[in-house]
Amino acid sequence: MMTVSVMITTRDRIVDLRRTCHVLQRLNPAPLEVLITIDGFTEDVHEAVKTELQQARVFVNQVGLGSVASRDRMMREARGDLVLALDDDSYPEQLDCIAHIVPLFAQRPKLAVLHFPQRTDEYPETLAQTDFGAEHSTRSFANSGAVLRRSIYLQLPGFEPRFFHMYEEPDYALQCVGARYDVLFSPVITIRHHYSGQARNEMRVHHRHARNELWSTLMRCPFPFAFGMVAGRVFSQFRYACKRGWSWVVREPSWWGQALSGIPSCLRKRTPVSWASYKNWLALP
């Protein structure tokens, strides 16, 4: 029987975290363990975690390292065969979710990531939705509701800590596709994602996504195709900024500078997939 760990990264969102902890306490069967990283130490969040989930394995980043580095550490520290990734404001709607998840991994040894439909306040129409479509392979997933096979994760580069926030999911999905593992969407369970607006800034999210997408391209796309892909990424992101207005356009170069500073690190960490695999990944929904 495969075992399941749960991992959550949190920062200054006590109400959301408490709600998620209450649900985790009621899961049946229960997970092997719950790992929680407090990214940027605050005493009240730490006390809330210890009160709500006394048996949780708690990691504390005194200075925030970001959700990506936090998840990478928990993936490597976890004891379970599978790791259910959640945000502090998301949780499974089915209390017997583990009983539904484990058989799919047992039946499919090449399954690296299994992710699920989300009912989220970000998209209110999903709150009453019942038909989320059939199972299918995807080019990304959301760490607010996905299960990762840990043995495969440890074979691959995994989440890139330098990303800080954003884009670790498509980058890891690309690694999986390149190694001929599967990333599968399945409506076998659903995730309730309250999607807290706290600590979110649209322009900052755009800049991080654009920067990390470019870094991922440099690390995973084979030469000489990487040059064209990088140019296409920059143009696509600039076009998006143009659609948002002049205030976005004049600030667009700020992420270009960040991206340039990270190029030497990306080149050192290059683990490109084949061009055929990269094209297959691009063609996925």
Image (tube, helix red, strand yellow):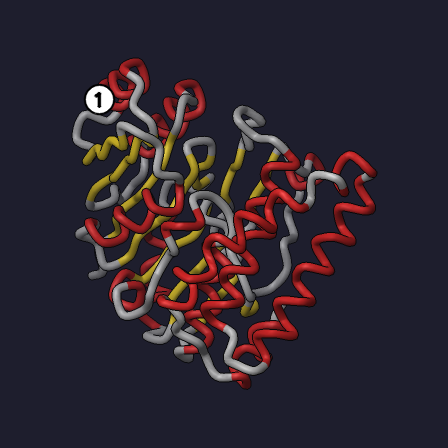
| Residue 132 rendering spot, x and y as whole percentages | 63, 54
Q: Find disc 1 in the rendering and name its residue.
A: 50
Judging from the image, what secondary structure is the residue with disc 1 in?
helix
Farthest top residue? 44
Number of residues whose C-alpha sits closer than 10 Å to that of mark 1, classed few (under 14), some (14–19) or many (20 or more): few
The amino acid marked with disc number 1 is Lys
Q: Residue at x 70, y 54 (%)?
A: 237
Q: Could you say which quadrant of the image residue 16 lies in?
A: top left
Q: Is residue 116 visible?
A: no
Q: Residue at x 31, y 29 (%)?
A: 63
* Above or below for 59 versus 75: above
Q: Residue 161 or 124: which is nearer the viewer?
A: 161
Q: Is residue 111 visible?
A: yes
Q: Residue 64 or 223: which is nearer the viewer?
A: 223
Q: Residue at x 69, y 39 (%)?
A: 251
Q: Residue at x 42, y 68 (%)?
A: 267
Quarter the N terminus occupies: bottom left
| Residue 59 rendering spot, x and y as whole percentages | 22, 34
